Amino acid sequence: MQIAVITTSQVPSITANSIQVMKVCQSYRQLGHDVTLIVPGKKTADWDEISKIFGIQTKFTIKYIPTYRVFRRYDFSFCSGLHIFLKNYDLIHTWMPQIASIAGFFRKPYIIELHGMPTGKVGPKIYKDIIFSKHKKLFLCITKALKEMYEKEYGFKFKDSEIQIAPNGVVLEPYLNLPESAEIKKNLGINDHFTVVYTGHLYQGRGMDLLIEIAKNLPEIQFIWVGGREGDVNQWREYINKNQIKNIRLIGFVGNEYIPTYQSAGDVLLMPYEMSIAGSSGGNSVDFCSPMKMFEYMAAGKPIISSDLPILHEVLNEKNAIFCPYNDVNQWVDSINRIKNNPAFGLRLGNQARVDVEKYSWIERAKKSLDGIVK
């Protein structure tokens, strides 16, 4: 099958949106399909660099379309639509309602991702037209909660044949056959002490203030932060040094291929989300998010302690994670100590998470979506 994947995400980039796009493309390619990723901009990196940044092993075609800021991406939509018309693609996969409309106009079946509610004056109207169109289409909605938000907003019910709840996922292979934590720590130059790991961005909503307070309360435990944009890393490093917090180590950004190693070095993995979660493009996704970090943590097979957000219960439960109120530092501290003092309990949590994540692999997501649109 010839599949065109079309998005405004930047390649390369360290945003969650871009990482998700690349994992989707790789999964289709691993299933044996020909994949062309179409993105705005100009080529700025070769495949080896892109592969390292995103942790991608399977190569696919990337087509760059130059755009001009004055046209506000409408030139990208037009040129992508022209490309769809000229090429004989069997399927279009997109995050853009404009592209979905164009694909439908050309009678091309399409998959459209739903990762948030439409905004602005034009977005809601385009989505409404798509929802009620007769096109051959499939909506991939990252959470059940988001699906219900759409149905409430537009006063309808999705057809079962046109909707799948499709959370973000994880590539499982990099988590297989890794050394034990002690050896990983040695290889990474990390002391072989009880270690709490956080991976991800460091901007608003990610719980960095909470992590600081937890570390202050547990000076005998080392905390490793992995990820973040350079400016955010420098800001937090300056704060940590100024306040003489000795047990936090900031690694900064690492290529996606190294994330499993750092996560597997941890004895505990933390998801300290706040009640407002800002994404790379802004907004607040706390009511409908599907963090890729969550699935990576599960794949690492280590005990997870998470903020008790309702949306996370669509995947996590008391058998594979510990939930804590975001603003209760003592409960987070007690939960970490519980795992430290009862390794068997932590092992049970981690093992169950590893079992549960099997159905959330990117490749399983791709298989299910293709089955839904091709049938």
Image (spheres, rainbow, N blue to C red):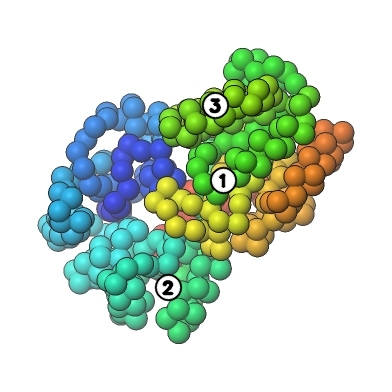
Q: Is residue 178 visible?
A: no
The kind of residue on which mark 2 rests is Glu
For residue 237, the mark is 3
Residue drawn at (53%, 74%) of the image = 148
For residue 64, the mark is none
The mark nearer the N terminus, 2 or 1, is: 2
Q: Is residue 92 visible?
A: yes
Q: Which residue is mark 2?
A: 162
The kind of residue on which mark 1 rests is Arg
Q: Secondary structure at mark 1?
A: loop
Q: Quadrant of residue 325?
A: bottom right
Say which of 374 and 357 sits in front: 357
Nearer the observer: mark 3 or 1; the answer is 3
Residue 157 placement (x, y as % from top left): 48, 81
Residue drawn at (61%, 36%) of the image = 198
Horizontal relation, residue 129 to residue 88: left or right = right
Nearer the observer: mark 3 or 2; the answer is 3
Q: Which residue is mark 1?
A: 206
On screen, residue 80 above or below 196: below
Residue projecting furthest to the front = 242
Residue 302 placement (x, y as % from top left): 70, 37
Horizontal relation, residue 84 to residue 100: left or right = left
